[in-house]
Image (cartoon, helix red, strand yellow):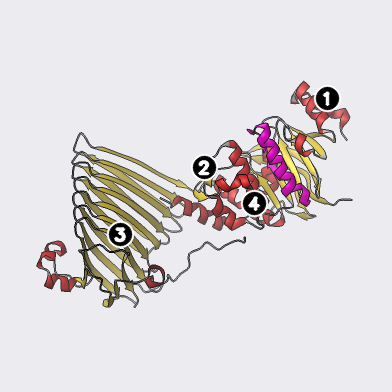
Protein backbone atom coordinates (compact mmCIF):
# COMPACT_ATOMS: atom_id res chain seq x y z
CA UNK A 1 0.00 0.00 0.00
CA UNK A 2 1.27 3.42 -0.96
CA UNK A 3 2.24 5.81 1.81
CA UNK A 4 0.50 9.10 2.37
CA UNK A 5 2.69 11.97 1.19
CA UNK A 6 0.58 15.00 2.08
CA UNK A 7 -2.15 15.11 4.66
CA UNK A 8 -4.22 18.15 5.44
CA UNK A 9 -6.40 18.16 8.52
CA UNK A 10 -9.33 20.56 8.67
CA UNK A 11 -7.30 23.52 7.49
CA UNK A 12 -8.83 26.96 7.93
CA UNK A 13 -7.28 30.04 6.39
CA UNK A 14 -8.12 33.67 5.93
CA UNK A 15 -6.82 36.66 4.04
CA UNK A 16 -7.66 40.27 4.91
CA UNK A 17 -9.87 39.05 7.74
CA UNK A 18 -12.01 37.05 5.31
CA UNK A 19 -12.21 33.32 5.88
CA UNK A 20 -11.54 31.49 2.63
CA UNK A 21 -10.81 27.91 3.63
CA UNK A 22 -13.34 26.61 6.09
CA UNK A 23 -11.89 23.35 7.37
CA UNK A 24 -10.49 21.47 4.37
CA UNK A 25 -9.23 17.92 4.80
CA UNK A 26 -7.30 16.24 2.04
CA UNK A 27 -4.66 13.63 1.50
CA UNK A 28 -2.58 12.37 -1.40
CA UNK A 29 -0.41 9.27 -1.61
CA UNK A 30 2.98 8.88 -3.25
CA UNK A 31 2.74 8.66 -7.01
CA UNK A 32 -0.96 9.45 -6.99
CA UNK A 33 -2.72 11.92 -9.30
CA UNK A 34 -5.66 13.81 -7.88
CA UNK A 35 -7.69 16.66 -9.20
CA UNK A 36 -9.54 19.47 -7.52
CA UNK A 37 -12.47 20.98 -9.34
CA UNK A 38 -14.49 23.98 -8.38
CA UNK A 39 -16.05 27.18 -9.65
CA UNK A 40 -14.32 30.55 -9.55
CA UNK A 41 -13.67 31.89 -6.06
CA UNK A 42 -14.37 28.56 -4.40
CA UNK A 43 -10.96 28.63 -2.68
CA UNK A 44 -8.95 26.31 -4.98
CA UNK A 45 -6.02 28.66 -5.56
CA UNK A 46 -5.97 29.70 -1.91
CA UNK A 47 -5.80 26.02 -1.00
CA UNK A 48 -2.77 25.58 -3.27
CA UNK A 49 -1.05 28.69 -1.90
CA UNK A 50 -1.73 27.65 1.68
CA UNK A 51 -0.24 24.19 1.10
CA UNK A 52 3.02 25.74 -0.14
CA UNK A 53 3.02 28.37 2.62
CA UNK A 54 2.15 31.75 1.11
CA UNK A 55 2.53 34.11 4.10
CA UNK A 56 -0.34 36.22 2.76
CA UNK A 57 -2.78 33.70 4.20
CA UNK A 58 -3.24 33.27 7.91
CA UNK A 59 -3.89 29.73 9.10
CA UNK A 60 -6.57 29.84 11.77
CA UNK A 61 -7.06 26.13 12.34
CA UNK A 62 -5.99 22.65 11.34
CA UNK A 63 -2.61 21.44 10.10
CA UNK A 64 -0.52 20.41 7.10
CA UNK A 65 1.62 17.29 7.24
CA UNK A 66 4.18 16.26 4.64
CA UNK A 67 5.77 12.83 4.90
CA UNK A 68 4.35 12.64 8.41
CA UNK A 69 5.98 15.88 9.52
CA UNK A 70 3.94 18.92 10.45
CA UNK A 71 4.87 21.79 8.11
CA UNK A 72 2.03 24.19 8.90
CA UNK A 73 4.41 26.87 10.14
CA UNK A 74 7.26 26.22 7.71
CA UNK A 75 8.38 28.96 5.32
CA UNK A 76 7.69 28.37 1.60
CA UNK A 77 11.37 27.76 0.88
CA UNK A 78 11.56 25.13 3.60
CA UNK A 79 8.58 23.32 2.15
CA UNK A 80 10.17 23.43 -1.30
CA UNK A 81 13.33 21.87 0.13
CA UNK A 82 11.18 19.03 1.48
CA UNK A 83 9.81 18.36 -2.00
CA UNK A 84 6.68 20.47 -2.40
CA UNK A 85 6.13 22.63 -5.47
CA UNK A 86 3.44 24.79 -6.99
CA UNK A 87 2.95 25.91 -10.58
CA UNK A 88 1.09 29.20 -10.37
CA UNK A 89 -2.05 30.04 -12.27
CA UNK A 90 -1.02 33.68 -12.85
CA UNK A 91 2.67 33.96 -12.03
CA UNK A 92 4.04 37.47 -11.39
CA UNK A 93 6.37 39.22 -13.82
CA UNK A 94 9.89 39.76 -12.55
CA UNK A 95 11.40 42.57 -14.52
CA UNK A 96 15.06 42.31 -15.45
CA UNK A 97 15.41 38.70 -14.26
CA UNK A 98 15.79 36.01 -16.89
CA UNK A 99 14.26 32.58 -16.53
CA UNK A 100 17.76 31.10 -16.89
CA UNK A 101 18.90 33.12 -13.85
CA UNK A 102 16.10 31.65 -11.74
CA UNK A 103 16.82 28.14 -12.97
CA UNK A 104 20.52 28.58 -12.26
CA UNK A 105 19.66 29.21 -8.63
CA UNK A 106 16.90 26.68 -8.06
CA UNK A 107 17.63 23.68 -10.25
CA UNK A 108 18.16 20.38 -8.53
CA UNK A 109 18.12 18.36 -11.72
CA UNK A 110 18.90 18.93 -15.35
CA UNK A 111 16.03 18.77 -17.77
CA UNK A 112 15.55 19.52 -21.39
CA UNK A 113 12.26 20.74 -22.71
CA UNK A 114 12.44 21.76 -26.33
CA UNK A 115 9.56 24.25 -26.00
CA UNK A 116 11.30 25.99 -23.09
CA UNK A 117 14.58 26.78 -24.83
CA UNK A 118 13.34 30.02 -26.34
CA UNK A 119 12.11 31.19 -22.95
CA UNK A 120 15.39 30.89 -21.07
CA UNK A 121 16.74 34.28 -22.06
CA UNK A 122 13.42 36.04 -21.61
CA UNK A 123 12.50 37.90 -18.46
CA UNK A 124 10.40 35.84 -16.06
CA UNK A 125 6.75 35.95 -17.18
CA UNK A 126 7.26 39.22 -19.03
CA UNK A 127 5.72 39.48 -22.48
CA UNK A 128 4.97 35.76 -22.54
CA UNK A 129 1.86 34.25 -24.04
CA UNK A 130 -0.45 32.25 -21.80
CA UNK A 131 1.01 29.01 -23.13
CA UNK A 132 4.60 30.17 -22.63
CA UNK A 133 3.86 31.03 -19.01
CA UNK A 134 2.59 27.51 -18.44
CA UNK A 135 5.72 26.01 -19.99
CA UNK A 136 7.89 28.28 -17.86
CA UNK A 137 6.04 27.20 -14.71
CA UNK A 138 6.30 23.55 -15.69
CA UNK A 139 10.03 23.84 -16.32
CA UNK A 140 10.65 25.50 -12.96
CA UNK A 141 8.69 22.99 -10.90
CA UNK A 142 10.27 20.02 -12.66
CA UNK A 143 13.73 21.46 -12.08
CA UNK A 144 13.06 21.49 -8.32
CA UNK A 145 13.01 17.69 -8.42
CA UNK A 146 9.88 17.60 -6.25
CA UNK A 147 7.90 14.83 -4.62
CA UNK A 148 4.60 16.66 -4.96
CA UNK A 149 3.52 19.21 -7.55
CA UNK A 150 0.33 21.24 -7.44
CA UNK A 151 -0.71 22.62 -10.80
CA UNK A 152 -3.05 25.55 -10.45
CA UNK A 153 -5.11 25.82 -13.65
CA UNK A 154 -2.30 24.54 -15.88
CA UNK A 155 -4.96 23.93 -18.56
CA UNK A 156 -6.45 27.41 -18.68
CA UNK A 157 -5.77 29.30 -21.89
CA UNK A 158 -4.19 26.35 -23.70
CA UNK A 159 -5.53 24.99 -26.96
CA UNK A 160 -6.11 21.25 -27.12
CA UNK A 161 -2.85 20.52 -28.94
CA UNK A 162 -0.74 22.42 -26.46
CA UNK A 163 -2.69 20.97 -23.57
CA UNK A 164 -1.87 17.47 -24.76
CA UNK A 165 1.80 18.39 -24.99
CA UNK A 166 1.82 19.81 -21.47
CA UNK A 167 0.05 16.74 -20.15
CA UNK A 168 2.63 14.50 -21.84
CA UNK A 169 5.45 16.46 -20.21
CA UNK A 170 3.82 16.16 -16.80
CA UNK A 171 3.45 12.43 -17.32
CA UNK A 172 6.99 11.88 -18.56
CA UNK A 173 8.86 14.15 -16.14
CA UNK A 174 6.73 13.72 -13.02
CA UNK A 175 4.07 11.00 -12.98
CA UNK A 176 6.32 8.32 -14.49
CA UNK A 177 8.97 9.19 -11.94
CA UNK A 178 6.60 8.62 -9.04
CA UNK A 179 5.87 12.26 -8.25
CA UNK A 180 2.44 12.98 -6.79
CA UNK A 181 0.38 15.50 -8.71
CA UNK A 182 -2.61 17.59 -7.71
CA UNK A 183 -4.36 19.18 -10.67
CA UNK A 184 -6.46 22.18 -9.80
CA UNK A 185 -8.77 22.93 -12.67
CA UNK A 186 -11.88 24.88 -13.39
CA UNK A 187 -12.97 23.18 -16.58
CA UNK A 188 -11.22 19.86 -16.15
CA UNK A 189 -9.84 19.67 -19.71
CA UNK A 190 -6.47 18.24 -18.65
CA UNK A 191 -8.04 15.32 -16.80
CA UNK A 192 -8.73 13.37 -20.01
CA UNK A 193 -4.96 13.20 -20.58
CA UNK A 194 -3.79 12.52 -17.04
CA UNK A 195 -6.69 10.50 -15.63
CA UNK A 196 -6.64 11.24 -11.90
CA UNK A 197 -7.05 8.50 -9.34
CA UNK A 198 -9.37 10.70 -7.33
CA UNK A 199 -11.30 13.87 -8.10
CA UNK A 200 -12.31 16.36 -5.43
CA UNK A 201 -14.83 19.15 -5.70
CA UNK A 202 -14.47 22.36 -3.73
CA UNK A 203 -17.28 24.77 -3.09
CA UNK A 204 -17.25 27.78 -0.82
CA UNK A 205 -13.95 26.89 0.91
CA UNK A 206 -14.76 23.24 1.54
CA UNK A 207 -14.18 19.97 -0.29
CA UNK A 208 -17.74 18.80 -0.55
CA UNK A 209 -17.24 15.52 -2.35
CA UNK A 210 -14.79 13.11 -3.96
CA UNK A 211 -15.10 10.52 -6.66
CA UNK A 212 -12.93 8.06 -8.52
CA UNK A 213 -14.69 8.49 -11.88
CA UNK A 214 -13.65 11.94 -13.04
CA UNK A 215 -15.66 11.62 -16.26
CA UNK A 216 -18.86 11.14 -14.35
CA UNK A 217 -18.10 14.16 -12.18
CA UNK A 218 -17.26 16.31 -15.19
CA UNK A 219 -20.48 15.24 -16.94
CA UNK A 220 -22.49 16.13 -13.89
CA UNK A 221 -20.83 19.53 -13.56
CA UNK A 222 -21.38 20.21 -17.22
CA UNK A 223 -25.03 19.31 -16.94
CA UNK A 224 -25.98 20.90 -13.64
CA UNK A 225 -23.17 23.39 -13.01
CA UNK A 226 -21.35 23.57 -9.67
CA UNK A 227 -24.33 24.91 -7.79
CA UNK A 228 -25.93 21.51 -8.01
CA UNK A 229 -22.77 19.58 -7.16
CA UNK A 230 -23.68 19.05 -3.60
CA UNK A 231 -27.00 17.46 -4.37
CA UNK A 232 -25.86 15.57 -7.45
CA UNK A 233 -22.73 14.04 -6.03
CA UNK A 234 -23.46 13.51 -2.37
CA UNK A 235 -24.74 10.06 -3.10
CA UNK A 236 -21.69 9.13 -5.15
CA UNK A 237 -18.93 9.98 -2.71
CA UNK A 238 -16.48 7.16 -2.73
CA UNK B 1 22.80 22.68 -11.49
CA UNK B 2 23.12 23.72 -7.88
CA UNK B 3 22.26 26.83 -5.90
CA UNK B 4 24.71 29.66 -6.26
CA UNK B 5 25.62 32.39 -3.85
CA UNK B 6 24.77 35.66 -5.55
CA UNK B 7 26.11 38.02 -2.88
CA UNK B 8 28.87 40.50 -3.49
CA UNK B 9 31.88 39.91 -1.33
CA UNK B 10 34.00 42.51 0.46
CA UNK B 11 36.77 43.53 0.07
CA UNK B 12 36.54 44.34 -3.61
CA UNK B 13 39.24 42.93 -5.84
CA UNK B 14 41.85 45.31 -7.10
CA UNK B 15 41.12 46.55 -10.60
CA UNK B 16 43.81 44.82 -12.61
CA UNK B 17 42.22 41.49 -11.75
CA UNK B 18 39.04 42.52 -13.48
CA UNK B 19 39.95 45.18 -15.97
CA UNK B 20 43.41 44.15 -17.13
CA UNK B 21 46.06 46.83 -17.38
CA UNK B 22 45.53 50.01 -15.38
CA UNK B 23 46.80 53.07 -17.27
CA UNK B 24 46.70 55.45 -14.36
CA UNK B 25 46.68 54.18 -10.81
CA UNK B 26 46.88 56.36 -7.76
CA UNK B 27 47.01 54.94 -4.25
CA UNK B 28 46.31 57.44 -1.46
CA UNK B 29 48.31 60.46 -2.75
CA UNK B 30 50.94 58.60 -4.75
CA UNK B 31 50.90 57.62 -8.38
CA UNK B 32 51.52 53.87 -8.34
CA UNK B 33 51.89 53.60 -12.07
CA UNK B 34 51.27 55.27 -15.37
CA UNK B 35 51.18 53.01 -18.37
CA UNK B 36 52.10 54.88 -21.51
CA UNK B 37 50.16 54.27 -24.70
CA UNK B 38 51.01 55.61 -28.14
CA UNK B 39 48.79 58.54 -29.03
CA UNK B 40 47.66 59.10 -25.46
CA UNK B 41 49.24 61.47 -22.95
CA UNK B 42 48.78 60.45 -19.35
CA UNK B 43 50.17 62.67 -16.60
CA UNK B 44 49.45 63.61 -13.01
CA UNK B 45 47.23 66.72 -13.16
CA UNK B 46 49.83 68.90 -11.48
CA UNK B 47 52.35 68.10 -14.25
CA UNK B 48 49.78 68.75 -16.97
CA UNK B 49 49.09 72.17 -15.41
CA UNK B 50 52.80 72.98 -15.80
CA UNK B 51 53.34 71.41 -19.19
CA UNK B 52 50.17 72.38 -21.07
CA UNK B 53 48.98 75.91 -20.38
CA UNK B 54 45.70 75.22 -22.21
CA UNK B 55 44.64 72.78 -19.52
CA UNK B 56 44.49 75.56 -16.93
CA UNK B 57 41.12 76.85 -18.07
CA UNK B 58 39.72 73.39 -17.42
CA UNK B 59 41.42 72.81 -14.10
CA UNK B 60 40.55 76.31 -12.83
CA UNK B 61 43.12 76.17 -10.07
CA UNK B 62 46.41 74.35 -9.78
CA UNK B 63 45.61 70.75 -9.01
CA UNK B 64 47.23 68.88 -6.16
CA UNK B 65 46.53 65.43 -7.42
CA UNK B 66 44.54 63.50 -10.00
CA UNK B 67 45.13 62.64 -13.63
CA UNK B 68 45.23 64.25 -17.01
CA UNK B 69 44.51 62.05 -20.01
CA UNK B 70 44.65 63.37 -23.53
CA UNK B 71 43.59 60.96 -26.26
CA UNK B 72 44.91 62.01 -29.63
CA UNK B 73 44.74 58.74 -31.52
CA UNK B 74 42.41 55.81 -31.74
CA UNK B 75 43.01 53.10 -29.13
CA UNK B 76 41.70 49.60 -29.47
CA UNK B 77 41.41 48.71 -25.80
CA UNK B 78 39.67 50.25 -22.79
CA UNK B 79 41.43 53.03 -20.97
CA UNK B 80 41.50 52.19 -17.29
CA UNK B 81 42.10 54.44 -14.31
CA UNK B 82 41.97 53.64 -10.65
CA UNK B 83 42.05 55.86 -7.60
CA UNK B 84 42.43 53.90 -4.40
CA UNK B 85 42.37 54.71 -0.74
CA UNK B 86 44.58 52.19 1.02
CA UNK B 87 45.60 53.90 4.29
CA UNK B 88 43.49 55.14 7.19
CA UNK B 89 42.12 58.70 7.24
CA UNK B 90 43.44 59.71 3.85
CA UNK B 91 41.88 62.80 2.34
CA UNK B 92 42.17 62.91 -1.43
CA UNK B 93 41.51 66.07 -3.41
CA UNK B 94 41.57 65.18 -7.09
CA UNK B 95 41.22 67.17 -10.26
CA UNK B 96 40.88 64.92 -13.29
CA UNK B 97 40.80 65.98 -16.89
CA UNK B 98 40.06 63.77 -19.89
CA UNK B 99 40.27 65.29 -23.34
CA UNK B 100 39.42 63.25 -26.43
CA UNK B 101 40.28 64.63 -29.83
CA UNK B 102 37.92 64.66 -32.79
CA UNK B 103 36.22 61.51 -34.08
CA UNK B 104 37.93 59.11 -31.70
CA UNK B 105 36.09 56.22 -30.09
CA UNK B 106 37.09 55.45 -26.50
CA UNK B 107 35.94 53.05 -23.84
CA UNK B 108 37.00 53.95 -20.32
CA UNK B 109 36.81 52.01 -17.08
CA UNK B 110 37.10 54.34 -14.14
CA UNK B 111 37.38 52.80 -10.71
CA UNK B 112 37.44 54.61 -7.39
CA UNK B 113 37.74 52.37 -4.38
CA UNK B 114 38.88 51.74 -0.84
CA UNK B 115 41.12 48.78 -0.15
CA UNK B 116 39.54 48.06 3.20
CA UNK B 117 36.21 48.45 4.89
CA UNK B 118 36.98 50.89 7.74
CA UNK B 119 39.68 53.29 6.52
CA UNK B 120 37.56 56.41 7.19
CA UNK B 121 38.91 58.05 4.04
CA UNK B 122 37.78 61.11 2.18
CA UNK B 123 37.67 61.20 -1.60
CA UNK B 124 36.93 64.48 -3.30
CA UNK B 125 37.06 64.23 -7.08
CA UNK B 126 36.28 66.88 -9.62
CA UNK B 127 36.48 65.83 -13.21
CA UNK B 128 36.13 67.52 -16.54
CA UNK B 129 35.66 65.49 -19.66
CA UNK B 130 35.89 67.10 -23.03
CA UNK B 131 34.48 65.15 -25.95
CA UNK B 132 35.42 66.93 -29.13
CA UNK B 133 33.50 66.78 -32.38
CA UNK B 134 32.36 63.30 -33.36
CA UNK B 135 33.82 61.54 -30.31
CA UNK B 136 32.22 58.42 -28.90
CA UNK B 137 32.88 57.69 -25.25
CA UNK B 138 31.64 54.80 -23.16
CA UNK B 139 32.48 55.72 -19.61
CA UNK B 140 32.08 52.98 -17.03
CA UNK B 141 32.46 54.49 -13.61
CA UNK B 142 32.57 52.17 -10.63
CA UNK B 143 32.66 53.06 -6.95
CA UNK B 144 33.57 50.55 -4.24
CA UNK B 145 33.96 52.16 -0.86
CA UNK B 146 34.39 51.27 2.76
CA UNK B 147 31.59 51.75 5.25
CA UNK B 148 33.10 54.85 6.87
CA UNK B 149 34.33 56.72 3.80
CA UNK B 150 33.15 60.14 2.66
CA UNK B 151 32.95 60.68 -1.06
CA UNK B 152 32.20 63.74 -3.15
CA UNK B 153 32.35 63.42 -6.89
CA UNK B 154 31.58 66.18 -9.34
CA UNK B 155 31.95 65.35 -13.03
CA UNK B 156 31.26 67.69 -15.89
CA UNK B 157 31.08 66.46 -19.48
CA UNK B 158 31.21 68.73 -22.48
CA UNK B 159 29.94 67.19 -25.69
CA UNK B 160 30.95 69.05 -28.79
CA UNK B 161 29.11 68.73 -32.10
CA UNK B 162 28.10 65.16 -32.92
CA UNK B 163 29.71 63.62 -29.82
CA UNK B 164 28.10 60.61 -28.18
CA UNK B 165 28.37 59.57 -24.57
CA UNK B 166 27.32 56.44 -22.75
CA UNK B 167 27.88 56.93 -19.05
CA UNK B 168 27.36 53.99 -16.71
CA UNK B 169 27.81 54.69 -13.03
CA UNK B 170 27.46 52.02 -10.41
CA UNK B 171 28.28 52.14 -6.73
CA UNK B 172 28.75 48.56 -5.65
CA UNK B 173 29.73 49.32 -2.07
CA UNK B 174 28.39 52.64 -0.81
CA UNK B 175 30.39 54.91 1.48
CA UNK B 176 28.92 56.44 4.64
CA UNK B 177 28.31 59.68 2.76
CA UNK B 178 28.14 60.10 -0.97
CA UNK B 179 27.55 63.29 -2.87
CA UNK B 180 27.50 62.61 -6.54
CA UNK B 181 27.03 65.35 -9.08
CA UNK B 182 27.06 65.04 -12.85
CA UNK B 183 26.63 67.78 -15.40
CA UNK B 184 26.37 67.33 -19.14
CA UNK B 185 26.64 70.13 -21.66
CA UNK B 186 25.25 68.87 -24.94
CA UNK B 187 26.19 70.54 -28.19
CA UNK B 188 24.59 70.22 -31.60
CA UNK B 189 23.62 66.71 -32.72
CA UNK B 190 25.03 65.13 -29.59
CA UNK B 191 23.56 62.26 -27.67
CA UNK B 192 24.05 61.10 -24.13
CA UNK B 193 22.81 58.02 -22.41
CA UNK B 194 23.29 58.13 -18.67
CA UNK B 195 22.69 55.15 -16.42
CA UNK B 196 23.13 55.62 -12.70
CA UNK B 197 22.86 52.74 -10.31
CA UNK B 198 22.92 53.86 -6.71
CA UNK B 199 22.98 51.33 -3.92
CA UNK B 200 22.61 52.69 -0.46
CA UNK B 201 23.24 50.73 2.73
CA UNK B 202 23.89 52.37 6.11
CA UNK B 203 24.65 55.50 4.16
CA UNK B 204 23.50 58.94 3.11
CA UNK B 205 23.54 59.62 -0.59
CA UNK B 206 22.88 62.78 -2.51
CA UNK B 207 22.70 62.53 -6.27
CA UNK B 208 22.26 65.34 -8.70
CA UNK B 209 22.47 64.96 -12.43
CA UNK B 210 21.82 67.80 -14.83
CA UNK B 211 21.77 67.70 -18.60
CA UNK B 212 21.78 70.91 -20.56
CA UNK B 213 20.44 70.46 -24.08
CA UNK B 214 22.22 73.42 -25.57
CA UNK B 215 22.73 72.41 -29.18
CA UNK B 216 20.18 71.80 -31.91
CA UNK B 217 19.04 68.15 -32.08
CA UNK B 218 20.85 67.20 -28.91
CA UNK B 219 19.39 64.18 -27.18
CA UNK B 220 19.62 62.57 -23.80
CA UNK B 221 18.14 59.67 -21.88
CA UNK B 222 18.84 59.51 -18.16
CA UNK B 223 18.06 56.38 -16.22
CA UNK B 224 18.36 56.51 -12.48
CA UNK B 225 17.94 53.44 -10.34
CA UNK B 226 18.05 53.89 -6.59
CA UNK B 227 18.05 51.06 -4.08
CA UNK B 228 17.49 51.95 -0.44
CA UNK B 229 18.66 49.21 1.84
CA UNK B 230 18.96 49.17 5.62
CA UNK B 231 19.41 52.56 7.35
CA UNK B 232 19.95 54.47 4.17
CA UNK B 233 18.80 57.82 2.91
CA UNK B 234 18.91 58.84 -0.73
CA UNK B 235 18.11 62.28 -2.08
CA UNK B 236 18.15 62.48 -5.84
CA UNK B 237 17.55 65.33 -8.22
CA UNK B 238 17.52 64.60 -11.91
CA UNK B 239 17.21 67.54 -14.29
CA UNK B 240 17.06 68.40 -17.96
CA UNK B 241 17.29 71.98 -19.13
CA UNK B 242 16.42 72.48 -22.78
CA UNK B 243 17.43 75.73 -24.41
CA UNK B 244 17.46 74.38 -27.95
CA UNK B 245 15.28 72.04 -30.01
CA UNK B 246 16.48 68.84 -28.40
CA UNK B 247 14.92 65.73 -26.93
CA UNK B 248 15.33 64.35 -23.46
CA UNK B 249 13.83 61.80 -21.15
CA UNK B 250 14.31 61.09 -17.45
CA UNK B 251 13.52 57.63 -16.15
CA UNK B 252 13.92 57.63 -12.38
CA UNK B 253 12.99 54.68 -10.23
CA UNK B 254 13.57 53.94 -6.60
CA UNK B 255 13.20 50.67 -4.75
CA UNK B 256 12.91 50.50 -0.98
CA UNK B 257 14.26 47.20 0.20
CA UNK B 258 14.18 47.89 3.92
CA UNK B 259 11.68 49.70 6.13
CA UNK B 260 14.46 51.88 7.58
CA UNK B 261 15.35 53.26 4.14
CA UNK B 262 14.18 56.58 2.74
CA UNK B 263 14.32 57.80 -0.83
CA UNK B 264 13.46 61.26 -2.04
CA UNK B 265 13.39 61.73 -5.77
CA UNK B 266 12.84 64.91 -7.73
CA UNK B 267 12.78 64.85 -11.52
CA UNK B 268 12.85 68.33 -12.99
CA UNK B 269 12.31 69.51 -16.55
CA UNK B 270 13.00 73.07 -17.59
CA UNK B 271 12.15 73.98 -21.16
CA UNK B 272 13.12 77.25 -22.77
CA UNK B 273 12.59 76.26 -26.36
CA UNK B 274 9.18 75.50 -27.78
CA UNK B 275 10.57 72.90 -30.17
CA UNK B 276 12.24 70.89 -27.42
CA UNK B 277 10.61 67.68 -26.21
CA UNK B 278 11.47 66.64 -22.71
CA UNK B 279 9.66 64.07 -20.63
CA UNK B 280 10.04 62.19 -17.41
CA UNK B 281 8.77 59.20 -15.48
CA UNK B 282 9.47 58.62 -11.83
CA UNK B 283 8.41 56.10 -9.25
CA UNK B 284 9.42 54.75 -5.88
CA UNK B 285 8.18 51.41 -4.71
CA UNK B 286 8.96 48.52 -2.49
CA UNK B 287 9.81 44.94 -3.38
CA UNK B 288 6.61 43.25 -4.52
CA UNK B 289 5.35 40.73 -1.95
CA UNK B 290 3.98 38.60 -4.75
CA UNK B 291 7.32 38.41 -6.57
CA UNK B 292 9.06 37.67 -3.29
CA UNK B 293 6.66 34.86 -2.40
CA UNK B 294 6.90 33.46 -5.92
CA UNK B 295 10.68 33.16 -5.71
CA UNK B 296 10.51 31.76 -2.18
CA UNK B 297 8.16 29.12 -3.56
CA UNK B 298 10.99 28.24 -5.90
CA UNK B 299 13.21 27.57 -2.90
CA UNK B 300 15.09 30.86 -2.58
CA UNK B 301 15.43 32.40 0.87
CA UNK B 302 13.90 35.82 1.40
CA UNK B 303 17.32 37.45 1.11
CA UNK B 304 18.23 35.54 -2.04
CA UNK B 305 14.87 36.45 -3.55
CA UNK B 306 15.32 40.16 -2.72
CA UNK B 307 18.85 40.14 -4.17
CA UNK B 308 17.54 38.64 -7.40
CA UNK B 309 14.63 41.09 -7.66
CA UNK B 310 16.99 44.01 -6.97
CA UNK B 311 19.46 42.76 -9.58
CA UNK B 312 16.62 42.76 -12.10
CA UNK B 313 15.52 46.23 -11.06
CA UNK B 314 19.05 47.53 -11.53
CA UNK B 315 19.32 46.31 -15.10
CA UNK B 316 19.03 49.48 -17.11
Q: Which one is earlier in the sequence, the residue at label 2 or at label 4?
A: 4
Indicate which label's residue lies in the foreground, 2 or 4: 4
Chain ID, mark 1? A
Which residue is depicted at the point 64% across and 48% down?
A113
Q: Are marks 1 and 2 in contact (CB under 8 Å)?
A: no
* Number of the label disc, if any, that sits on residue A112: 4
Nearer the observer, A214 or B28: A214
Q: Position of residue A206 (x, y in %)?
A: 76, 35
Q: Which residue is mark 2?
A: A126
Q: How far apart are labels 1 and 2 at the CA level?
A: 42 Å
Image check: A135 left or right of B60? right
Q: Quadrant of the C terminus of chain A?
A: top right
The reply to whether label 2 and label 4 mark residues of one chain is: yes
Q: Position of residue A153 (x, y in %)?
A: 67, 37
Decide: is A165 above or below B262: above
Nearer the observer, A78 or A218: A218
User: Residue A168 magenta-drawn?
Assistant: yes
Q: How far apart are labels 2 and 3 at the CA level?
A: 35 Å
Nearer the observer, B197 or B229: B197
Q: Are marks 3 and 4 in contact (CB under 8 Å)?
A: no
Q: Position of residue A150 (x, y in %)?
A: 71, 44
Chain ID, mark 2? A
* Number of the label disc, if any, that sits on residue A232: 1
Q: Secondary structure at mark 4?
A: loop
Which residue is depicted at the point 28% across and 63% down?
B152
How busy is the neighbourhood of tag 1: few (under 14 within 10 Å), some, or many (20 plus)?
some
Point out the stretch of residues depicted in magenta: A150-178
Q: How far apart are labels 3 and 4 at the CA level?
A: 49 Å
Q: Which residue is mark 3?
A: B179
Indicate which label's residue lies in the foreground, 1 or 2: 2
Q: Secondary structure at mark 1?
A: helix
Amino acid sequence: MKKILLKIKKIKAKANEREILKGVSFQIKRGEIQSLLGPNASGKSTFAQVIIGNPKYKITGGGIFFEGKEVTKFSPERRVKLGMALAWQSPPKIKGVKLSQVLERISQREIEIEEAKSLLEKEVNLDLSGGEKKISELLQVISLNPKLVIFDEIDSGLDIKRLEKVAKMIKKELVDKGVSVLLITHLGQILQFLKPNLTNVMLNGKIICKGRDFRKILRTIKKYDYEKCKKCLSAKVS
Amino acid sequence: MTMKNVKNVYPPKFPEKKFGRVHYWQIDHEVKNIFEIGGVTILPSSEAWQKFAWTRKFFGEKPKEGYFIWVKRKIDFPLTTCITIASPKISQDLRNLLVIEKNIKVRANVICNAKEKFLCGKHLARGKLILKEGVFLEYNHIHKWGEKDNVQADYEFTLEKGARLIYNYRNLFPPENLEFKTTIHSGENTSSNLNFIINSLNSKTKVKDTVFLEGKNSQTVVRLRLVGRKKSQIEAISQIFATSPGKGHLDCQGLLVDKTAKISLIPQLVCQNKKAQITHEASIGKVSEEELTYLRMRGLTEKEAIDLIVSGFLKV
